[in-house]
Image (cartoon, rainbow, N blue to C red):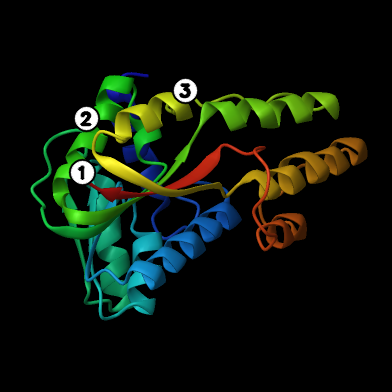
Amino acid sequence: MDFDEVRKYWEERASQNGSAQSTTRDYYLRDIEFRVIRTQIEQYKPQIVMDAGCGDAWTTARLATRFNEVKFIGVDYSEAMVENAQVNINRMGINNVHVILCDVSKPLPLQEMDMVYSTRCLINLPSWELQQAAIRNIAGSLRGKGIYLMIENFIESHDNFNQVRREFGLAEIPVRDHNLFLNRVKLLEFASSFFEILNEVNISSTYYLVSRIIYSKICQDNGATPDYFDVHHELASKLPFCGEYGPVRMICMRRR
């Protein structure tokens, strides 16, 4: 897909307003991401936080209710998603979140952020050049020593995961048409021009091994259709992080 096609895809997904599955059908993966961001906010104690590619602001709103002393700003390039986000925020009565229509691949009108996080935002930009522009713009929106918490999908660990699926007699899970997964080596080489890398961990490996391999194999053997809300997903989401067998990685960076 090209840029306009990807944006159209998300405009159509925005019709699922009110659903915790509007930006990903995997509810428990989204919960893992929430808990990871929550931990980083507790550690770094930012006062102003931007969610780059906030979608319907489900994660942003959850964080805002927990950290009511923090100001959250959500940005997204989908007008329908921004409208849905504002409806959700109003419905929940949250007063420390502001959402604006903004394309992260273009210079951002926000500066001096203490922290920026993205959850599967960059992978929805259909070229490495646009992804580079987004990283550059995020760096520009941060104050000196500000934190960028990148939670994105990476192709290397996605391939590792599919190798295990093949060994279990399961079909590979392809990268979706609207996604461009990052290459870790190339990403770190580019990002190091703007950031000091503080920490990185694959936050999806254990979860994917249980939910996408063990549970999927059980479903295949029993002729059942996998369910994102099955207890295997719920329990897997509570396991410690280990291994390199899932696409979603957290990289914590500090602006130079």
Using a 10 Å C-alpha cutoff, classify the residue at mark 3 as few (fewer than 14 neighbours), some (14 to 19) or many (20 or more).
few
Image point (42%, 27%), residue name: 178
Q: Does residue 32 appear in the picture of this structure?
A: yes
Given the image, on which type of amino acid does mark 2 rest? Ala
- Tell me the tag on residue 133: 2
Relative to residue 181, is residue 41 depicted above or below? Answer: below
Using a 10 Å C-alpha cutoff, classify the residue at mark 1 as few (fewer than 14 neighbours), some (14 to 19) or many (20 or more).
many
Sooner in the amino-acid sequence: mark 3 or mark 1: 1
Sooner in the amino-acid sequence: mark 1 or mark 2: 2
Quadrant of the rendering where the N terminus is positioned: top left
Left-right relation of 254 to 177 = left
The quarter holding residue 121 reads top left
- Tell me the tag on residue 177: 3
Residue placed most toward the observer, 46 or 230 = 46
- Tell me the tag on residue 157: none
Q: Which residue is mark 1?
A: 139
Left-right relation of 115 to 188 = left
Q: CA distance from mark 2 to mark 3?
A: 21 Å
